[in-house]
Amino acid sequence: MIKHRSLLLTIGTHVILVLWLFIMLFPIYLALATSSHNEQSLLHAPIPLSFGHHFLQNYKLVLFHGLNALGGIPVWVMLKNSLIMALLIAFGKIIVSIFAAYAIVYFRFPLRMFFFWLIFMTLMLPVEVRIVPTFQVVAEFHLIDSYWGLSLPLIASATATFLFRQFFRTIPSELLEAARVDGAGPLRFFLDILLPLSRTNIAALFIIMFLYGWNQYLWPLLATTTGDMSTIVMGMQRLANIADQIPQWNYIMATAILALLPPVVIIIVLQKLFVRGLIDSEK
């Protein structure tokens, strides 16, 4: 009876997993199928679920030649802008946050916890709240239409600082004492001990922060004035909201699939470290 119930439970679990996997993958399949048709095929219901004969043609057009709705800017330029911005934001957030957490945990200075809670309180001030003063500062430093202008205002991260602080507090104090006995200074202790131990946390935060930077729309919209600095999210929005025209869904879906590839590659490469960084018992 127990074996029979266990078998039914296993079958039921797999059925639910397969069904859920189908629900998650169907929109991606639909986007791929839609991106392989021409415009006329998508103007009449029902939407074709099979692949068409314009797959390579559509992707070649949006990737290398550009569309009128995008000002003739090829999608690869937007992908490059988004990739550089997301990498700068991810690396910048990790570097700033890990050093801030290191100083808060291992250094004793006046108002140490006050500064930590001051950093933590910035969670209540997202980009949308401080958008006007941030834009004024970036404009005064002449960083409009630059990669630093796109990334610097988004680098500070209270969440990453908090997570690194919590992780550093779980590290035994004996490691610090042993490092001091061996003559290691603060920088050597950080590079040789803390940084290797933080590898899984860094990988997990890198994926989260990369996706955060990749999906940004409002700030790049304000911080760029030329099409050459547009991001891929801005490009998709422009394609989907063409004034007085029917959206070209085959090109929109092709752009969406191309925009999906870099985050998927990052997640696949860092998947094991990402999972370990979220569930490790040392945390």
Image (tube, rainbow, N blue to C red):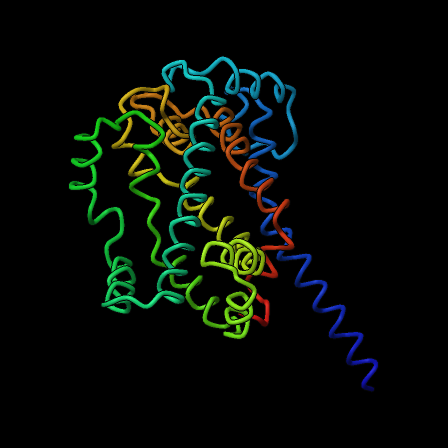
Which residue is painted at 23% across and 54% down in the image? 125
Residue 273 horizontal side relative to residue 97, left or right:
right
Which x, y percent locates residue 206?
50, 49
Which residue is painted at 57% across and 61% down in the image? 197
Observer-nearest residue: 113 or 124?
113
Task: Give the quadrant of the N terminus.
Answer: bottom right
Observer-nearest residue: 29 or 245?
29
Which x, y percent locates residue 196?
58, 56
Residue 261 horizontal side relative to residue 165, left or right:
right
Which x, y percent locates residue 115?
25, 63
Observer-nearest residue: 222 or 102?
102
Q: Is residue 111 above or below residue 265?
A: below
How many numbered marks have been drawn onto this rendered protein structure?
A: 0
Which x, y percent locates residue 43?
48, 25
Q: Is residue 182 above or below residue 25?
A: below
Residue 198 horizontal side relative to residue 158, left or right:
right
